[in-house]
Amino acid sequence: MKTKNVFALLMIASALTIAAVVANQKARAQNTSLRPTDKKGAMSANAAGAKTNNQWYSIFVTNIPPGYRDWTLISVAREEGSLDDIRAILGNDIAAKAYREGTLPFPEGAIIARIAWSYDASQENNKTFGKAQSFVAGAPKNGVQFMVKDSKKYSETGGWGYAHFNDGKPADTSFMQSCFPCHDLVKSRDDVFTRYAP
Amino acid sequence: MKNYLVPIIAVALTISAIIIRQRAHAQNVSSQSADKTSSASAETVGVKADTPPASPEDSPVPVTEIPAGYRDWRFISVAHEEGNLHSFAAVLGNDVAIKSYRDGKLPYPDGTIIAALHYHHVPSKENNEIFGREQSFVPGDPSNIQFMIKDSKKYASTGGWGFGHFQDGKPLTDQAKIKACFNCHAKIESRDLVFTRYAP
């Protein structure tokens, strides 16, 4: 009987995990899964490494939100200087809706993603145009960043959980300390720099 | 016995979740042509850039309506054009386009739509003030929106692609200018006339 119970529980856990993963990865309309309850569930189901450092998880985002590459375009930008990249800012449905409706502060569950690439002169475009004018996104650069709104979990950092991933790995704590103080300079826009491109 | 009902229900829920997602996805596809079999002909139809239209049938057909919901499409890439254009381009694709890009399939099937949202390229004063240096450039006012719509029959005279250019919501209908779109895009025939590559 006990073995049966354990088996049943394992089945439920794996089925729910699969459901969560599938729903997240394919979802365009429902990117609500990063809400605290779901995330907690997903992390305990995935287990590995989640319990090694509770403090870390209480401040920063350490899981890449699934399906972010399918999210809605918020805007693009070019950063010169040491960053030297060209970037796109995407938002999940909650974030995109808040942007379009001008809702501030951003509601719980809003996630904003920043993807960046090397700022490359396009030889093939320039060849076609007959002049050097075209710059395009090259290889991924400067990691992938996220801001996840959860005002309870991330109350220390203005209600936003910050994330930076290099090759899928979260950046170290010292690096992460710099996110919030800078973003908090645009407090009037709920710590979000990017404006919506119409 | 009861213990086994729960996992069965869970699996059933999983399957229904997948089905719901796939349906929702399918609904996002707009103006997809039913005629998928003819997509291969797009390649053979491709007219050389330096070949002027010889007969009235060769007249380019401009895209005169903005495809619905394009601003919700998925992101393909971003670009900056210097010179006279001095623009930012955000390139989005409908579901058919995104799938083709990710699968690396050429030619693009009928129903593919690629949107280029163009904005003026302006420095961000507010960002630069915070950073304490000039480094940040963002989209300013929109300058125009362009579309490429794949319909190998309707747009046979322009490589199977319909070209659309909208300024303040109004379409460009000048056939010579539409032809100019095609002539330049035809230079990249090896990628089915599409310049933009997918940003990973």
Image (tube, rainbow, N blue to C red):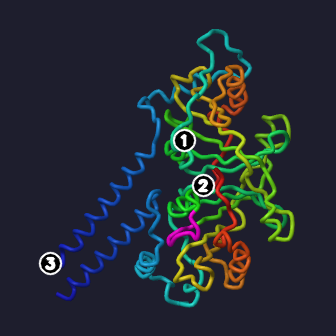
Q: Amino acid at mark 2?
A: Leu
* Relative to A105, B196 lies left or right: right
Per the model, the C-alpha gap separating discs 1 and 2 is 24 Å
Whole-percent x and y of residue A88?
Answer: 66, 57
Judging by the rendered image, the residue that carries numbered circle 1 is: B105
Earlier along the polypeptide chain: callout 1 or callout 3? 3
SS at mark 3 in the image: helix
Q: Is residue A56 above or below residue B11?
A: below
Say which chain tag 1 marks: B
Q: Are marks 1 and 2 on the same chain?
A: no
Q: Are marks 2 and 3 on the same chain?
A: no
Say which chain tag 2 marks: A
Magenta highlight range: A103-111
Mark whose residue sits in front, 1 or 2? 2
Q: Quadrant of residue B142?
A: top right
Per the model, the C-alpha gap separating discs 2 and 3 is 47 Å
What number is the disc on residue A73?
2
Q: Quadrant of residue B9?
A: bottom left
> What main secondary structure does the magenta stretch of the protein show?
loop
Whole-percent x and y of residue B12?
Answer: 25, 64
Judging by the rendered image, the residue that carries numbered circle 3 is: B2
Disc 2 packing (10 Å; few <14; some 14–19; many ≥20): many
